[in-house]
Amino acid sequence: MTAGWTEDRVGALKKLWLEGQSASQIAKQLGGGVTRNAVIGKVHRLGLSGRATPSQPARAATTFRPARVRTTPPVQPSAPRRIEAAQPRPVAPTPSLPSVQELPGTATVMTLGAHMCKWPIGDPSSPEFSFCGRRASEGVYCVEHARVAFQPALKRNGKDELARSLRRYI
DNA sequence: CCCTGATTCGC
DNA sequence: GCGAATCAGG
């Protein structure tokens, strides 16, 4: 079932793409068994590319890839694709960020000192990631976290308690 | 593992 | 021209 790129669909594609929709989103909306690959392929063929990135900005030209290798030797010199200078992209919508986290760790990776508790707090991939930062007793953790970190083998009935105590620190 | 776009190349 | 496969990255 090859829907083919009718003017309609191409128009919709352009619109949605320029709107900032992701390829997969557009593929869904166009329906008709169009995959995101198809969308991306078409987009490139149309010469559209690069725009405000909605969610996961996978910037182009981040790295040169060896390209795909399936069968047949590369005999094609491959014409120069397209020299894209940095174009002024549409201003990305800036959603306001509310709320400040409530009392995260007191130390960041930058301020974490030698004798500060290195118990991680929060998602390490988050900018809000921090460390406990309290006085480290002997090891790298403060007393409280050391207890959690160095839990001896669970005793009977200790599971729930551990789970509860862990929860407190996460 | 989810997602993103980019690229190549057999069809 | 088309798009699956593959890649690279967040």
Image (spheres, coloured by chain):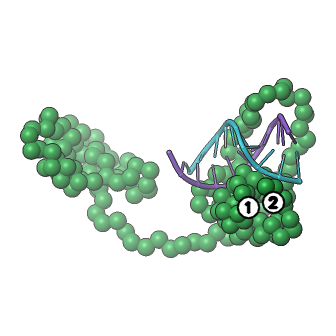
Chain colours: A green, B purple, C cyan
Q: Is residue A152 above or below residue A32?
A: above
Residue B4 is situated, as x and y percent measured from the top left of the image, at 64, 55
Name the subunit of mark 2: A
Q: Position of residue C5 (x, y in %)?
A: 70, 38
Residue A166, numbered label: none
Give how far apart the Cα atoms at labels 2 and 1 are: 7 Å
Point 35% across, 54% down: residue? A122
The quadrant the C terminus of chain A occupies is: bottom left
Checking the image for residue A3, the label placed there is: 2
Q: Tag 2: Cα neighbours inside 10 Å, few (<14), some, or many (≥20)? A: few
Residue at the outermost top position? A73
Local packing at callout 1 (Cα closer than 10 Å; few below 14, some 14-19, many 20+) is few
Q: Chain of mark 1?
A: A
Q: Residue at x 28, y 41 (%)?
A: A114
The x and y percentages for residue A81 are 86, 46
Callout 2: SS:
loop
The residue that label 1 is drawn on is A32
- Please report the residue visible at 30 percent of the width from the left and 66 percent of the height from the top: A102
Q: Nearer the viewer, residue A66 or A36?
A: A36
Query: Residue A46: which quarter of the image?
Result: bottom right
Check whether the beta carbons of the residues at disc 2 and disc 1 lie within 8 A of each other: yes
User: Residue farthest to the left?
Assistant: A156
**Image height check: is A91 above or below A74?**
below
- Three-letter residue code for mark 2: Ala
Q: Earlier in the sequence, mark 2 or mark 1?
A: 2
Whether labels 2 and 1 belong to a single chain: the reply is yes
Residue A52 in view of the camera: no
Residue C3 at x, y = what percent? 76, 49
Q: SS at mark 1?
A: loop
Name which residue type carries label 1: Gly
